[in-house]
Image: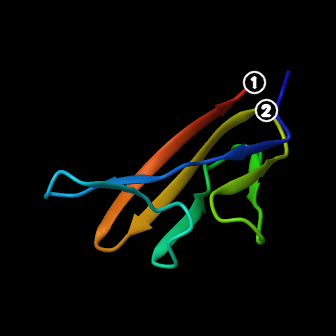
Amino acid sequence: ERPDTITLIITANFSNSSSQVVTSDSSLVYSIIDISGAETVIEKDSESPGVFGVLAAGTAKIQIDYRDDNFVAVILVP
């Protein structure tokens, strides 16, 4: 069964061995990466950082920018 929403929880691990959940940090930016030729699978929830509505089954990519680092999350929706 396909979920209605997907919520990412972003934890930053710092060089001083501390960790902090930064999902709602104002310096964190989420961007959906277009996958050429693929159907749109998710959309951002403008009200909730890290929350994405599921539109269809398929593969989605989200770029996560935090401070000077960039990460990509790949999500497979059944």
For the residue pair 37 and 66, the one nearer the viewer reads as: 66
Tell me which residue sits at (62%, 50%) in the image.
36
- Mark 2, secondary structure of its residue: loop
In this rendered view, identify the residue nearer to me: 37 or 52.
Answer: 52
Front one among 16 and 30: 16
Residue located 33% across and 74% down the image: 67
Residue 58 position, x and y percent, is: 72, 33
Residue in view at x 47 percent, y 60 percent: 64
Left or right side of 49 for 65? left
Q: Judging from the image, what secondary structure is the residue with disc 1 in?
A: loop
| Above or below: residue 9 compared with residue 49 | above
Q: In 3D space, how far apart are the residues under numbered discs 1 and 2 (Cα atoms)?
A: 5 Å
| Residue on which disc 1 sits | 78
Q: Residue furthest bottom?
A: 26
Q: Is residue 28 above or below residue 77?
A: below
Precedes in sequence: disc 1 or disc 2: 2
* Cβ–Cβ under 8 Å for marks 1 and 2: yes
Is residue 33 shown left or right of residue 48?
left
The residue type indicated by label 2 comes to: Ala
Q: Which mark is residue 57?
A: 2
Displayed quadrant of residue 65: bottom left
What residue do we see at 56% from left, 48% from top?
Answer: 61
Relative vertical location of residue 53 with respect to residue 77 in this rendering, above or below: below
Is 13 placed left or right of 55 in the picture? Answer: left
Q: Split into 4 quadrants, where in the image is the N terminus?
A: top right
| 47 sits to left or right of 37 | right
Which quadrant is the C terminus positioned in?
A: top right
